[in-house]
Image (cartoon, grey):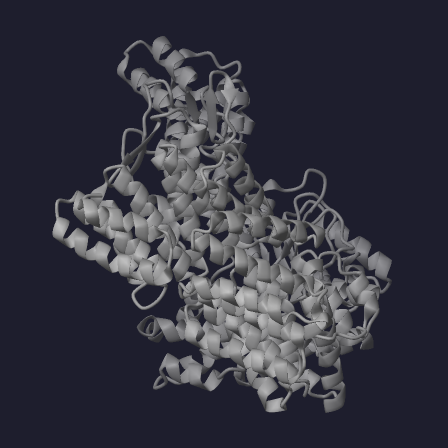
């Protein structure tokens, strides 16, 4: 087994490469390989995988990663220790270890040729930067150490090569290495000396100038002793002196002293300047929304590039977005030529002749030209320099897609640390004294530099104010407060808005009414009444002028302050028009969300939610994937409900959550159901709509049930039954009664489950004889109740009928559910393990395909019990950790308690008494006030732990408690506990 980290992560087993594809697994393996011979703490690995922002289930997910690695690697390679994990390696298994050994050998031997050979062998192991492609911060920090060792080894090797006098291929190799490590002065000096030896003194001196410029540009320092000494030696060989530099023309505006942030943009732009252009100017185009700091950034980069372009630094404001008309190209050329010192009487009036003179004047100059606030590509056509060696920086609020051969840089808002740093530079120590308030201030400012500067200016000029005082002034809508003298953020936005065409202005204003933070073209078409293609065109246009963003293809958003600005503009519409626009959007969302329900669920959806014809059938026809659409819109469902009230359409407040229920429930978004349908139920009650109350109560009961509030769930379902009976809705009555069966299961009332199913059969009327979904639910209730009571043959018979129904109805989750239950029954009947495993595998595929979180966890737990029966405790525990992780995420305490008891069972059988006791204790805490079956299971298991620990008295006490609960429920598990009590042992 061979591992490679000197380049991309690589695992080779017997000449065959093993693909480690999961990103988290790759990070974990990389961290272990970066610490050979060590145990890496679990906390360190968690931080490496999640960059110090781990989820609550991080430990369990880490264990899953390690388990997957164990399956892919030979046995015994991954080590487990109470402190963490490690990896077992032989001397030659890891390329980094071999590299270190060879470099050490080279430094210990006295003979140069042997040392040179060892270093060449060591350097040949490298396939690229260490662990390239892994962006974990912890991995990159450790990999950077390896990269540094590589660079030092390169320099040691180059010294040996220079000392050996064999320079024929050295220049080419060193040139490539200098490009890779441009700031390493020792390496640069070695290249200069090799060039000198090759008779290329001018190139050696030019290399020194490039190094000097780069060091000053990137680090603000002069060359160190190694470079200066190499330069001195070359000059001593009568190299021609460097040409004198004429005084520069400096017309750049004053750079701000508190420039902060946009580090990535600065690096990219400086790199583009350094790369240059072979046969023309370097043109950098910076676009961004109003107030994003485009001009500040351009001036900063221009100043950083001044020494590379020492002859002239020019600037002109093209006023593309201002209160005045954009400057005509002829006027801009006049300004630029005058900055170059051209006399007014020498400047032609004709535009073409003036442009020719401009290009002639720039010819041969190393100049930087800033063309600020451009309106369009056409405005720039004759202004951009044409001569090599020139640098041109263009800023615009518009994306200038008409310019070819340029380096574009779209400027986002600042990240939070940079935004706070900018505020601190403006305000001073008060920011550090109130970090929480400062962070909230920059958030209210949308992390927009202009907004932060205006807010900070108000605070800087009020020394008695605390940051919290400014925060209170900003309030929830900060836009009106972001002003200083005649500068406001709103006025900056207005300059962009007024240049839009009328249709674009109308759409932008209506976007201020959209409830969600993000929006798709379909939603915008519904909101605005536009055809879909027209909506797409308008959105593309708004992106081009940086009034909206497109973070993902066909998914758009407004900056927070622009949202406030658009909402203020939307207030200019008549109230009726605003309400109609929002109602159009909500109607589309209702029908789109309803379309995400599987066909097997449409029967009850249509019963609960008569939808009628959609306002925009064309948009629904264009909806490719309703489920994906709903998942995108899911975070904004509460905002849709709020918008329904604002538009005086409260019916949407319960209709939209009902339509989304199946998607939310199967994927474990139980808290969202609870919040949405609680409001929906209140709305239905206020409206006096009894059918709506019954619907909302029935589906709100599902979240109350999942969240452990069984009493509330039962009361809601009983209310739904009563209302449905009053309305003569037999199907609705049956649905609510079947849901009561689920409550009975949670409460351990298995006999009543079966009786409820029997009562349902007796009450079935012709009016809903064909209600297949309710009939299917009834079989579920009947089958699960009998299975729990140990009537396995009856349960198997019922589940087979239910399976046939689910297949006929194409009810994917129903099929998965029956496969799971049939597998449990067959396992308990002693059926074929292979058949049981195939059923569970089929159920797992179906549950995962539907995103059914609880079902997936149940199958994983059943597979764990199979592994336990086969004597594979490690595999069983891994599956149980996965199952537990799922139910922890969705806060399903009942299933978590069950899986914790399963863990206790496996650990106890493996002799891990302490771990088993902790697992059972955890289950008991989760079942302190409810879940009698799960509590009895945990009590029985804890009793076995006490017996194994030599405490028979405690064991008997716990078993007696378990027996009382099992007997009350009438389940066969009581027999096993009775045997333990009689025998007095586990």
Establish if 864 lies above or below 541: above
Residue located 74% across and 65% down the image: 521
| x and y percentages locating residue 977 in the rendered image | 27, 50
Q: Toward the viewer: 421 or 196?
A: 421
Q: If the image is split into quadrants, where does the C terminus sit?
A: top left
| x and y percentages locating residue 224 in the rendered image | 37, 38
Does residue 559 appear in the picture of this structure? Answer: no
Residue located 28% across and 12% down the image: 109
| x and y percentages locating residue 971 in the rendered image | 38, 55
Establish if 440 lies above or below 665: below
387 relative to 132 in the view: left or right = right
Q: Toward the viewer: 41 or 979?
A: 979
Does residue 418 appear in the picture of this structure? Answer: yes
Q: Toward the viewer: 850 or 329?
A: 850
686 relative to 108 in the view: left or right = right
| x and y percentages locating residue 187 in the rendered image | 43, 29
Q: How many marks?
A: 0
Which picture quadrant has residue 739? bottom right
Q: If the image is split into quadrants, where does the N terminus sit?
A: top left
Residue located 57% across and 64% down the image: 664
Establish if 110 lies above or below 492: above
């Amino acid at each position: 087994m061979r591992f490679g980290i000197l380049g991309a992560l690589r695992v080779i087993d017997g000449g065959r490469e093993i693909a480690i594809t999961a990103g988290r697994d790759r990070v974990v393996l990389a961290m272990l390989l970066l610490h050979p011979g060590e145990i890496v703490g679990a906390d360190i690995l968690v931080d490496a995988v999640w960059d110090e922002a781990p989820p609550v289930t991080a430990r369990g997910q880490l264990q899953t990663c390690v388990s997957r690695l164990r399956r892919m690697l030979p046995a015994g390679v991954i080590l487990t220790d109470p402190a963490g994990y490690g990896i077992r390696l032989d001397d030659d298994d890891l390329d980094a270890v071999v590299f270190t050994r060879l470099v050490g050998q080279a430094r210990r031997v006295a003979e140069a040729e042997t040392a040179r050979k060892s270093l060449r062998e060591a350097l040949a192991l490298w396939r690229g930067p260490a662990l390239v492609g892994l962006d974990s911060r912890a991995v990159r920090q450790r990999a950077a150490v390896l990269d540094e060792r590589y660079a030092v080894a390169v320099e040691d090797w180059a010294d040996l090569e220079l000392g050996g006098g064999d320079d024929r291929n050295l220049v080419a190799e060193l040139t490539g290495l200098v490009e890779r490590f441009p700031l390493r002065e020792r390496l640069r000096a070695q290249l200069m000396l090799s060039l000198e030896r090759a008779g290329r003194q001018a190139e050696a001196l030019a290399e020194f100038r490039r190094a000097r410029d780069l060091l000053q540009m990137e680090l603000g320092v002069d060359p160190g002793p190694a470079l200066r000494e190499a330069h001195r030696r070359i000059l001593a060989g009568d190299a021609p002196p460097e040409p004198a530099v004429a005084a520069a023309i400096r017309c750049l505006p004053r750079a701000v002293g508190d420039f902060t942030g946009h580090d990535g943009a600065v690096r990219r732009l400086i790199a583009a300047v350094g790369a240059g252009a072979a046969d023309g100017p370097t043109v950098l185009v910076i676009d961004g929304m109003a107030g994003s700091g485009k001009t500040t950034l351009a001036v900063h980069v221009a100043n950083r590039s001044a020494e590379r372009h020492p002859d002239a630094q020019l600037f002109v404001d093209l006023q593309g977005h201002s209160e005045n008309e954009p400057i005509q190209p002829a006027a801009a050329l006049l300004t630029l030529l005058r900055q170059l010192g051209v006399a007014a009487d020498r400047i032609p009036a004709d535009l073409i002749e003036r442009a020719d003179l401009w290009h002639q004047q720039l010819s041969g100059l190393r100049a930087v030209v800033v063309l600020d606030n451009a309106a369009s590509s056409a405005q720039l056509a004759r202004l951009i320099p044409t001569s090599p060696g020139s640098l041109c920086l263009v800023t615009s609020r518009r994306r200038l897609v008409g310019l070819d051969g340029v380096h574009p840089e779209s400027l986002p808002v600042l990240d939070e640390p940079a935004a706070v740093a900018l505020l601190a530079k403006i305000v001073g120590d008060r920011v550090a004294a109130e970090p929480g308030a400062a962070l909230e201030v920059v958030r209210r400012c949308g992390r927009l530099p202009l907004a932060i500067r205006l807010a900070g200016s108000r605070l800087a000029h009020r020394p008695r104010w605390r940051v919290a005082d400014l925060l209170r002034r900003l309030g929830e809508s900060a836009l009106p407060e972001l002003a200083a003298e005649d500068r406001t953020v709103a006025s900056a936005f207005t300059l962009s808005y007024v240049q839009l065409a009328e249709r674009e202005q109308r759409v932008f204003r209506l976007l201020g009414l959209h409830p969600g933070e993000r929006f798709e073209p379909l939603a915008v078409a519904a909101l605005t009444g536009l055809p879909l293609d027209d909506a797409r065109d308008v959105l593309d246009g708004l992106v081009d002028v940086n009034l909206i963003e497109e973070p993902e293809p066909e998914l758009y958003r407004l900056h927070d302050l622009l949202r406030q600005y658009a909402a203020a503009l939307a207030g200019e519409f008549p109230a009726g028009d605003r309400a109609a626009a929002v109602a159009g959007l909500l109607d589309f969302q209702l029908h789109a969300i309803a379309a995400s329900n599987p066909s097997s669920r449409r029967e009850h959806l249509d019963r609960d939610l008569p939808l009628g014809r959609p306002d925009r059938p064309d948009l629904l026809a264009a909806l490719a994937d309703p489920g994906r659409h709903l998942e995108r819109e899911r975070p904004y469902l509460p905002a849709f409900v709020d918008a329904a009230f604002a538009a005086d359409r409260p019916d949407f407040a319960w209709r939209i959550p009902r339509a989304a229920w199946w998607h939310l429930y199967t994927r474990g978004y139980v808290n969202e159901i609870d919040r949405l349908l609680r409001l929906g139920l209140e709305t239905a009650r206020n409206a006096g709509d009894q059918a709506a109350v019954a619907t909302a109560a029935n589906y709100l009961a599902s979240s109350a049930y999942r969240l452990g509030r069984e009493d509330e769930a039962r009361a809601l379902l009983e209310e739904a039954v009563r209302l449905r009976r009053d309305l003569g809705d037999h199907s609705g009555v049956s649905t609510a009664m079947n849901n009561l069966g689920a409550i009975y299961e949670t409460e351990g009332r298995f006999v009543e489950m079966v009786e409820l199913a029997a009562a349902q059969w007796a009450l079935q009327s012709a009016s809903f004889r064909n209600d297949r979904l309710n009939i299917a639910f009834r079989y579920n209730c009947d089958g699960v109740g009998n299975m729990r009571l140990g009537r396995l043959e009856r349960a198997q018979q019922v589940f087979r009928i239910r399976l046939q129904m689910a297949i006929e109805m194409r009810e994917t989750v129903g099929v998965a559910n029956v496969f799971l239950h049939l597998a449990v029954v067959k396992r308990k009947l002693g059926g074929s393990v292979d058949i049981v495993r195939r059923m569970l595998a089929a159920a797992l595929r179906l549950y995962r395909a539907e995103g059914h979180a609880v079902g997936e966890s149940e199958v994983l737990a059943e597979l764990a019990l199979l592994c336990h029966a086969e004597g594979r405790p490690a595999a069983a525990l891994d599956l149980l950790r996965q199952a537990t992780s799922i139910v922890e995420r969705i806060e399903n305490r009942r299933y978590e308690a069950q899986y914790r008891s399963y863990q206790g069972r496996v650990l106890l059988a493996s002799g891990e008494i302490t771990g088993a006791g902790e697992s059972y204790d955890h289950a008991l805490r989760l079942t302190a006030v409810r879940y009698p079956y799960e509590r009895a299971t945990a009590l029985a298991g804890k009793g076995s732990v006490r017996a194994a620990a030599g405490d028979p008295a405690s064991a008997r006490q716990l078993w007696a408690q378990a027996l009382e609960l099992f007997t009350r429920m009438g389940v066969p598990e009581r027999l096993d506990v009775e045997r333990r009590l009689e025998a007095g042992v586990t």
